[in-house]
Image: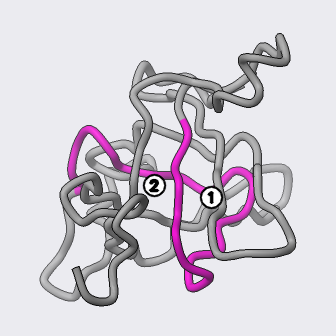
Amino acid sequence: MKGENAMRGLKRQKQTVYWSRVTEYLDGIDTIKTYQKPELHHLSVSATAGTPEELSAGYIPDYDRYITNFGRNFKPQTADVFWIDRKPELTDAGELVLGEDGEPAVPPDYRLKKILDTQKGNVARYGIKYTGDGSDGE
């Protein structure tokens, strides 16, 4: 397996994930959300919450799943959104198709809740909260 760590980050363990940064600005008294053009990534996504280290220490995580990334080219921020179990509806230019309310036609199903990154090494984990039920992940 050239160029691929035999123990971690195998291509078959990765799934398609769309990531978008959400920014908000005030327009008078209204808060307007804007979504950055979604980026396609292939990342490892856990089936459950909590890393083995956290669970063995008795820590109960406040997120539902976590994403593990094996490189430093992916730098999400808290409150960024992800489409993991569904695919966003995109225009030919790759932009999100938005409804009349300014929200994506296919809403994101997860929001970044916690960055579990370290300063050294190439492995980073990100705790994500399910929002597919229409909640904001809080």
Q: Left or right: 72 with respect to 101?
A: right
* Kind of residue at badge 1: Lys
Label 2 crowding class (10 Å Cα cut-off): few <14, some 14-19, many 20+? Answer: few
54 in magenta: no
Mark before the other along the chain sequence, 1 or 2: 1
Q: Percent from the top left, x then y, of residue 38?
A: 39, 72
User: Between 94 and 54, which is closer to the camera in this rendering?
Assistant: 54
Could you say which quadrant of the image residue 127 lies in? top right
Residue at x-position 39% and y-position 53%: 44
Q: Which residue is mark 2?
A: 102
Across and down, in percent, residue 108 comes to 41, 44
Q: Residue at x 69, y 50 (%)?
A: 79
Q: Is residue 42 left or right of residue 80?
A: left
Can you tell which quarter of the image residue 40 is in? bottom left
Distance in Å between CA atoms under marks 1 and 2: 8 Å
Q: How many marks can you see?
A: 2
